[in-house]
Image (cartoon, coloured by chain):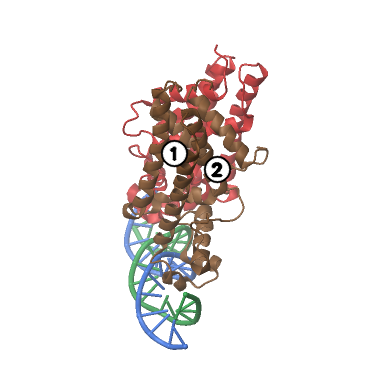
Chain colours: A brown, B red, C green, D blue
Amino acid sequence: MRRVHSGGPALPPRSATGGTRGRILLAGLGLFAEHGFHGASIRDIAAEAAVQSASLYAHFPSKEAILAELVLAGHEEHHTRLVTALLKSGTDPRDRLAALVRAHVRAHTDYPMLAVVANNEMHALSPAAAAPAAAVRRRSEGLLAEVLAMGCQHGVFDLVHVEATAAAIGSIGIRVASWYPAPEIGLNPSQLADVYASLALRMTGARPP
Amino acid sequence: MRRVHSGGPALPPRSATGGTRGRILLAGLGLFAEHGFHGASIRDIAAEAAVQSASLYAHFPSKEAILAELVLAGHEEHHTRLVTALLKSGTDPRDRLAALVRAHVRAHTDYPMLAVVANNEMHALSPAAAAPAAAVRRRSEGLLAEVLAMGCQHGVFDLVHVEATAAAIGSIGIRVASWYPAPEIGLNPSQLADVYASLALRMTGARPP
DNA sequence: GTCTATAGGCCGATAGAC
DNA sequence: GTCTATCGGCCTATAGAC
């Protein structure tokens, strides 16, 4: 039962550092995504990165530090995409919500392994190691909450329940990393993002523009 | 970063066998939910069940067998609830979808640890050990697909995209196990199930009854 | 920065007494 | 069915040469 249906491990340009350090991060990403933090050993990562296990410690102080960097990178890439999408969108809450959901979905289709590690393996970090990513996550959740609040305030959204709707919209995107691409879905990432943006708008009871 | 926000580990009556074997299952459930399969050791489980680690092997042939039983129990409890909900509902696809989503959500609010283990730790099983649960999962997915197809056929649903909508409806429920109950959500399990049923109906573009 | 070698400990699982 | 004791192996991390 594979956890991610995509090809190989990939890091966004901002985090793809290259060199041995980059190979270690990519190896950790692939192995943590597939087997989980505790299911992948230092020796596994070293073998995948084509170095000896002792050499890892010239680049990271511990196995946990490799995971912490991946988890933070995943949260930051996601958050940056959300912010960029909002900056490019207009003032209509419907447009802003659609832009947010599209960016949310695309982060998960474009870097599914990073998303799986960031979401499913964060629990393996100590509270201190998880704190930076947790802070980014709270800011991302705040972006969605703000758009929903604005839409209610302006009377263009008719929410059944604010927090539950926010949780639902977040959930549909997060799960994308675990199932996309499905065999017969017949949607490329951009099309899936559009479909999910439509579903999110329907969930908000958005008035027709 | 806790993976489940609820209280202690709990098994549904059909799986709560009692005795030492039952204590081992409950201990495994709590520890696998919190730390993952590879993050919980045989000795951890034994200590939690108040036996010596060697005694586990009088009840299960391996650590993997403990996980396999939990994963199957989670899938079966979930599937049984879906089937029961459909049996109790009428023929209107809107009623059937609402019943299905309510049951889906309640399975995740009532046994969040079991749901987290079944969804997030199944990947640690060998294909052979995961097969029974995977078969149950496919049948559950089929129930949702059938209700959506029926709704389209009768013209009461107007789906943006069938498979993507099914994935989205499944996703909102699955994630519930990981965040519910949130601090300020202000919804009991039954109320959350109702809200999510409304959101699912909105996603389908259901005609008003 | 990469290597060989290894420390010190925990892992899953088994043997055999009771 | 539960225990004590232990096997053989893999774990993370470090020491020290180059």
How far across and how far down the image is residue A22, in percent? 51, 64
Where B179 sits versus D8, above or below? above
Badge 1 crowding class, 10 Å Cα cut-off, few under 14, some 14 to 19, many 20 or more, is: many
At label 1, the amino acid type is Leu
Front in this rendered view, residue A99 or A89: A89
Front in this rendered view, residue B56 or A56: A56
Residue under the image location 42 percent in, 57 percent down: A69
How far across and how far down the image is residue A168, in percent? 46, 32
Instruction: Please give the label number shown on residue B114.
Output: 1
For the residues labelled 2 and 1, say whether their Cβ atoms are less than 8 Å apart: no
Residue under the image location 50 percent in, 48 percent down: A115
* Chain at tag 1: B
Front in this rendered view, residue B176 or A67: A67
Tell me if A167 is positioned left or right of D5 in this view. Answer: right
Quarter assignment of residue B130: top right
Badge 2 crowding class, 10 Å Cα cut-off, few under 14, some 14 to 19, many 20 or more, is: many
Front in this rendered view, residue B143 or A51: A51
Q: Secondary structure at mark 1?
A: helix
- Is residue B70 among the parts visible in the rendering? no
Instruction: Please give the label number shown on residue A106.
Output: 2
